[in-house]
Amino acid sequence: MDPPSPAMASPPNLPPPAFPESVLVHGTDEASVNAVAVGMALRFHGSFAWADCAPPVDGQMSVARRICAKGSRLPDLGPVAAEVLKPPKWSSTSLRRLVAPESTEGEERLTGFLALPELFQELVARSSAMDGRSAILLANVDALAPALRERVVEPRDYHDELHREGVSFFASSRRRPTQGLVRAFDRVLSVYVPPASDRWEGLVSVEKGLTSGADARPCRLRDVWALLGLDPDLLAA
């Protein structure tokens, strides 16, 4: 990834969303990328449920996994298998036998939610908050096979269904996202860590969403962390 312009500004404007949204963070430094995604989920929602699409290397927990686990205080759901990325097989008849919604709208919402991939449903169930809002994080989506990523992460219908249920969707990628991924997300941020630099010196840039102009210029990860009001120990996981 090419380094962003060295021009620095105040930390980018990261207001809490007025409604659920989808946020993608990408860059080659796995720990920094996931730290930004975790930080935004914590700051705006207080908690989140997560899963890592990349399998452990040599059975060891990566720095990114430690950051996600420490931030969420929940373990991930284990290796993400292709089976859990498919919607469960529900028919409208079996749905009505199982649940009798009080209205047509209720039935449509339930049908829409049950059409989500099984992994999303499980994460939402684990992340539900008392105020009705929740957040889920799918780390390292670049590890998914391209066809699977296109079928699971890119469909805007899935994002809209999560938002309708009060769920914000955060994702991270260790590679530059495809145009399909960029189109699917409301906000896209990139993180660039210069060679031989501490990850605190990583530069966070806004590529889609938020404000333009001076606030869109890169800022240091340490400044973003301070703006989000998060514990520095989390990034030291």
Image (spheres, rainbow, N blue to C red):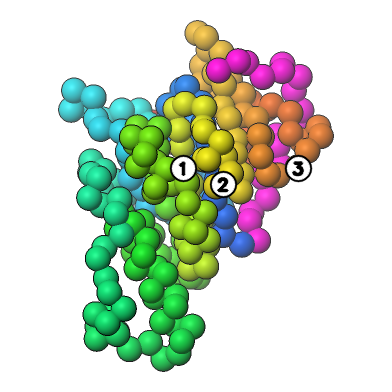
Relative to 150, say whether 217 is above or below: above
- What amino acid is found at the position of numbered circle 3 in the picture? Thr
- Density class for disc 2 (Cα within 10 Å; few <14, some 14-19, many ≥20) is many
Which residue is nearer to you in this view: 152 or 15? 152
Relative to 114, say whether 127 is above or below: above
Q: Label for residue 138?
A: none
Relative to 82, say whether 232 is above or below: above
Of marks 2 and 1, the one in the foreground: 2
Cα gap from disc 3 to disc 2, whole angstroms? 15 Å
Question: Mark 2 — residue?
Answer: 185
Corner quadrant of residue 113: bottom left
Question: Mark 1 — residue?
Answer: 171
Image quadrant in which the C terminus is located: top left
Look at the numbered disc 3 and give the secondary structure of its residue.
Answer: loop
Q: Kindly identify the residue that appears in the image at 62 percent across and 24 percent down.
A: 203
- What amino acid is found at the position of numbered circle 1 in the picture? Ala
Total marks placed: 3
Q: Are marks 2 and 1 in contact (CB under 8 Å)?
A: yes
Question: Mark 3 — residue?
Answer: 211
Residue 192: x and y in percent read: 57, 21
